[in-house]
Amino acid sequence: MYAVVKTGGKQYKVTIGEKLKVEQIPADIDSQIVLDQVLMVVDGETVVVGKPTVAGATIKATVVSHGRGDKVRIFKMRRRKHYQKHQGHRQNFTELRIDAIEK
C-alpha cells in the first residue's frame, strides 16, 4: 500500500514505515501530524485517484527531526566585466516517519 501526498508544494510517494525529508513543518519532535492533501491511494489492485484530493484520506506521520540540507553553492560571473558573485544556500527540512495511511 502506498499513497501520493502533497506537502510544501511538492509531491511525495509514501509507504508505511518510510522516512522522508519534506519542507520544514512547524511541529515539535516526536509529535504526530496529519497530512490531508492525499492525491492518490493504491492498495493492491485498487487505485483511488482524487479530484484533486481523495476525500477522507489522511496520512499520519511522526516528526523525527529537523535539520538543514547540504549547501548549494551559487556562482555568477560576467566575463570581461569584473563581476563575480558567490552565494550559498541551505534549505531547512523536517524528517517524517509515516505511521499510517487511512482511506
Image: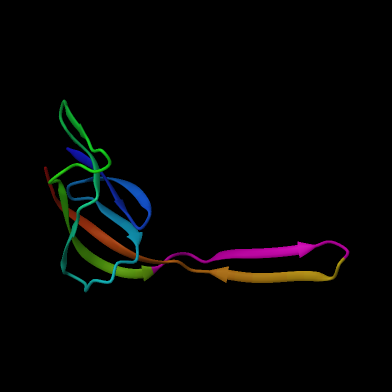
Residue at the bottom extreme of this rendering: 28
- The x, y position of residue 33, in whole percent, is 18, 62
Residue at the top extreme of this rendering: 45
Q: Which residue shows up at 71% across the image and 64% down it?
A: 76
Q: Which residue shows up at 71% across the image and 70% down it?
A: 85
Q: Which residue shows up at 16% across the image and 25% down it?
A: 45
Q: Is residue 21 in the magenta section?
A: no
Occupied quadrant, residue 54? top left
Q: Is residue 68 above or below residue 44?
A: below
Asked if residue 57 lies left or right of residue 11, the reply is: left
Q: Which residues are magenta?
A: 68-80
Q: Is residue 78 in the magenta section?
A: yes
What quarter of the picture does the N terminus occupy? top left
Occupied quadrant, residue 22? bottom left
- The x, y position of residue 87, in whole percent, is 62, 71
Q: Which residue shows up at 86% across the image and 67% down it?
A: 81
Q: Is residue 47 above or below residue 100?
A: above
